[in-house]
Structure formats: structure tokens, C-alpha cells
Image (cartoon, grey):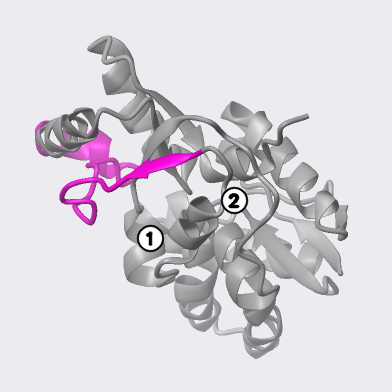
Amino acid sequence: MQISLFITCFNDTLFPDTGKATVQLLERLGHTVEFPMEQTCCGQMHYNTGYHDEAIPLVRKFVEVFGDAEAIVAPSASCVAMVHEFYHKVAERAEDRGLAREVDRVVPRVFELSQFLVDELGVEDVGAYYPHRVTYHPTCHSLRMLKVGDAPLRLLHNVKGLDLIELPAAEECCGFGGTFAVKNADTSMAMLGDKIRHIKDTGAEVCIAGDNSCLMHIGGALQRQRGGVKTVHLAEILASTED
């Protein structure tokens, strides 16, 4: 399959290893991956902060860049959820029927990585090897908006050498929520404190998630507390091998 990588601006700027791992993984499974250089932000930050009109040109750019792609895959449930849940609303706000038609055409071909592997490709064992004790944090967008279900867990259960420990209160938010963590810092930190306590209780060496935004939030607290737990994106785990 010809796959277009939608890396997201967050990963591109702060976590480039996640994009590299995504490409490595998909190519190992026999697919061709292209990276459209013209891609920009999906507009989530603008839309969630109330700048709905400013999100319109970003939606136009997205459907222009990815309009002819066979499949569009991103290692970010958050950004994929923006495309699936809000692009139609942005097109309606723009009062542009042409844009709405393009959104209708593109959205079904946009996938979060684990969802794409399990639900579209039917792959649960990607040949990964990661000999560590880990726990998995399911991010809010993956759970509540994309409804990826147990796809990430099914992939992790097939990683050779990996010891997966269930995270207590896993479905509770980590408190990041993009600009929520800035606007509601005290609430965010209280939620983060609960999440960190649960992660430490597992005794895991590594906390895994499918969104680097949440991992940045969690990882920052773990580092400040010298918790001895590192954070790693799901794509990087799945891309790891014995060689």
C-alpha cells in the first residue's frame, strides 16, 4: 500500500524519532511511505482555543495535500480525531460546499497508527522486540473520540520480551488537554499527580502512549520527580527489533 505519513507539527518539531519509527515500521511490513513536504498543522490548537475561522485555511491545506493519498497515517490520535470529528464543522463554518465534499472524501482515509495496523491491515504481530516492563496509558482522544479500543494493547501483547502491566485507573485523563494545561494549570497538575502515582504503582520501567503530547506532560513530571520511569511512543516500541 502507498501510505502518506501525516506526522503532525508536534511530532515534527519535538519528537522526530516517532516519525522515523513510524516509517521504519510501515516499511518493514512491506508498504511504501511518502512524506508530503507541504503538510502543515491540522488546526486542532486553533479550533480548540476558539479560533475557528483561523482553522479554515489549515483544513483547506490538509485536503489539498492529502487529497489523492491512498491512506493517511499519523502517530497521533489527537490530530486524527481533529480531522474526523471537526473538519466537517470547519467546512460548514466556511460555508464552502466544495471544501465539505473534499473533507468527506479524505476523512475516511485518515488513520491513527494502531487503528490502521489492526483494523485496516489486520496485523497484530509486527515482529517487534522490547525486553522491558511497561505500562500503557490510553489517551483521551484515542479512547473517547477515535474509539481505537484495544488495538494498542493487542499490538503490545505480541511484542517479544515485553512485560505489559495494567495501569490502574487507565482511562482517567493525564490532565494535558493542550491549552487546558495552560488555562487550568492547578486542575491539570492535580490530574497529572494522580496519573503519575498510578504509573509508579505498576513498577514499570516505561510508560507508553499513542500521543506524544500526553507523554510530554507525563514525562515532564516523571523527570522532575526522578521517578525512574521513561516515556516512549507506541510507534517506537513497535519499530524496535532484536537486530
Mark 1, Cα crowd under 10 Å, few <14 / some 14-19 / many 20+, is many
Residue 141: x percent and y percent?
A: 38, 60
* Residue depicted at 25% across the width and 37% down the height: 181
Quarter holding residue 179: top left
For mark 1, give the secondary structure: helix
Q: Which residue is mark 1?
A: 141
Q: Is residue 126 above or below residue 120?
A: above
Residue at the disc numbered 2: 75
The residue lying at 52 percent from left, 80 percent from top is: 88
Task: Answer above or below: position of 225 versus 64.
Answer: above
Vertical side of 183 occupied by 154: above or below: below
Residue 182 part of the magenta segment: yes
Q: In the image, is residue 100 part of the stretch drawn in magenta?
A: no
Q: Position of residue 238 (x, y in %)?
A: 62, 45
Q: Residue 174's spot in the image, x, y percent?
A: 24, 42
- Locate the C terminus and report the quarter of the image it occupies: top right
Tell me if I can see residue 35 in this picture. Answer: no
Three-letter residue code for mark 1: His
In terms of secondary structure, what is the magenta stretch mainly?
loop
Which of the 4 quarters of the picture holds residue 171? bottom left
Amino acid type, callout 2 = Pro
Number of other residues with Cα within 10 Å of mark 2, as a class: few under 14, some 14 to 19, many 20 or more = many
Residue drawn 29% across the image and 40% down it: 176
Alpha carbon separation for disc pair 1 and 2:
12 Å
Q: Which residues are magenta?
A: 162-187
Residue 151: image x %, image y %?
48, 65
Q: Classify 225 as above or below 178.
A: above
Q: Secondary structure at mark 2?
A: loop
Quadrant the N terminus occupies: bottom right
Q: Earlier in the sequence, mark 1 or mark 2?
A: 2
